[in-house]
Structures are given as structure tokens and as C-alpha cells.
């Protein structure tokens, strides 16, 4: 694009923006049919608003409704599943070992070297055990995933 063409494009844009700014705030011309339709809606709207809006008080915002007795009460959730003993030990190693090492580091407790190695081994062993015990196949063998 040459400089002359660029000037023409810029001047057209400037003219358009000037027209927008000059006419900002002006009311649009409305057809007479539209004015009559809006006036008819305005005459009906106050009655409609009065019938829809409840007369609220500070004590009870909805005096005509009995919403307290019709509320949804969710069912009691099922109990949390309890892990088997081997998985509980593995999770304890995964979360407990770093926690003990972190607390001993923050409090300045000097752990014997063998205890520190055992805590690291418990973390690695628990993590590996949980990975090995993961299911290999899909939960639902007949489910091929989302297909369209």
C-alpha cells in the first residue's frame, strides 16, 4: 500500500469518527408506528409491574409464599470410603514422611541419618506402591469415551 492510499484510508477513518462524535447524544428518528407501540406498552406496564412486584416487609420479604416448607433438602451423602490397610500405609508414607522431614527442618530438630533415610524410603516406597496398584484398564470396559 502506497503512502497516498494510506492517507486516503486514514482520512476516511477520521471522517467516520468525526461523524460519530458530532452525532453523539442525538436521539434517533423513530417511525410513528414504533412510537405508538411504545406508548401502548408504557400504558400497560405499570399495572403489570404492580401485579408482579410483591409488597415486601422487613420481617418477611415474601409474605404470600411458603418457601420454608418447600425447600429442597438434599439426601444424606454416603459415607467416605475407607482405604485398605496397605493403601493407608502407602498414603501415610507419601504424605507423612515429607511432613515429618519438613517439621524437623523448620524446628531445627536434628534427625539421625538412618531416620531421614527411612523417611525418604517410606515416601518413595509408598508412591511406587500406589502407582503399581493403579488399575490398568478403563473403569467401564464398554465406554469408548466421547464419540459423536
Image (cartoon, helix red, strand yellow):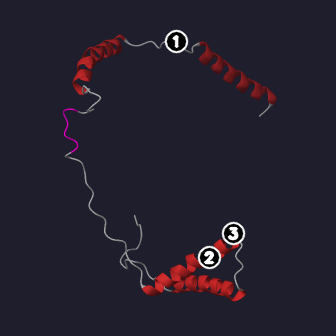
Mark 3, other Cα within 10 Å: few <14 / some 14–19 / many ≥20: few
Residue at horizontal 67 percent and vertical 18 percent from the top? 15
Question: Which residue does the image show at 25% across and 54% down from the upper left?
Answer: 73
Circle 2 sits on which residue?
100
Please provide percent x and percent y for residue 17: 64, 20
The region drawn magenta spans 63-68
Pointers 3 and 1 in contact (C-beta within 8 Å)? no
Mark 2, other Cα within 10 Å: few <14 / some 14–19 / many ≥20: few
Please name the residue that numbered disc 1 is placed on. 26
For residue 67: magenta?
Answer: yes
Q: Earlier in the sequence, mark 2 or mark 3?
A: 2
Q: Compare residues 54 and 116 and report the one nearer the observer.
A: 116
Q: Main secondary structure of the magenta part?
A: loop
* Callout in the foreground (3, 1): 3
Q: Do the residues labelled 2 and 3 touch (CB within 8 Å)?
A: no
Residue, x 32% and y 16% (percent of image)? 38
Toward the right, the furthest residue is 3
Marks 1/2: CA distance? Answer: 72 Å
Say what secondary structure mark 3 lies in.
Answer: helix
The mark that comes first in sequence, 3 or 1, is 1
Rate crowding at label 1 as few (under 14), some (14 to 19) or many (20 or more) other CA atoms within 10 Å: few
Residue 63 % position (x, y):
21, 32
Residue 106's disc number: 3
Using the numbered discs, state the Cα–Cα distance from disc 3 to disc 1 in whole angstroms.
69 Å
Relative to 33, does residue 61 appear above or below in the rendering? Answer: below
Q: Can residue 134 be seen in this view?
A: no
Q: Where does the image place residue 147, in percent across and percent down from the top left? A: 41, 67
Amino acid at each position: 500500500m502506497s503512502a497516498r492510499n494510506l492517507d486516503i484510508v486514514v482520512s476516511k477513518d477520521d471522517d467516520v469518527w468525526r461523524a460519530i462524535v458530532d452525532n453523539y447524544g442525538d436521539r434517533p428518528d423513530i417511525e410513528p408506528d414504533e412510537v405508538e407501540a411504545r406508548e401502548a406498552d408504557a400504558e400497560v406496564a405499570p399495572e403489570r409491574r404492580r401485579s408482579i412486584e410483591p409488597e415486601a416487609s422487613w420481617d418477611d420479604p415474601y409474605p404470600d409464599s411458603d418457601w420454608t416448607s418447600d425447600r429442597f433438602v438434599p439426601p444424606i451423602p454416603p459415607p467416605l470410603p475407607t482405604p485398605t490397610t496397605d493403601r493407608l500405609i502407602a498414603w501415610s508414607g507419601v504424605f507423612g514422611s515429607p511432613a515429618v522431614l519438613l517439621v524437623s527442618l523448620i524446628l531445627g530438630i536434628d534427625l539421625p541419618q538412618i531416620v531421614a533415610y527411612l523417611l525418604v524410603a517410606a515416601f518413595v516406597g509408598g508412591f511406587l506402591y500406589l502407582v503399581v496398584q493403579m488399575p490398568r484398564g478403563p473403569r467401564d470396559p464398554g465406554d469408548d469415551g466421547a464419540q459423536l
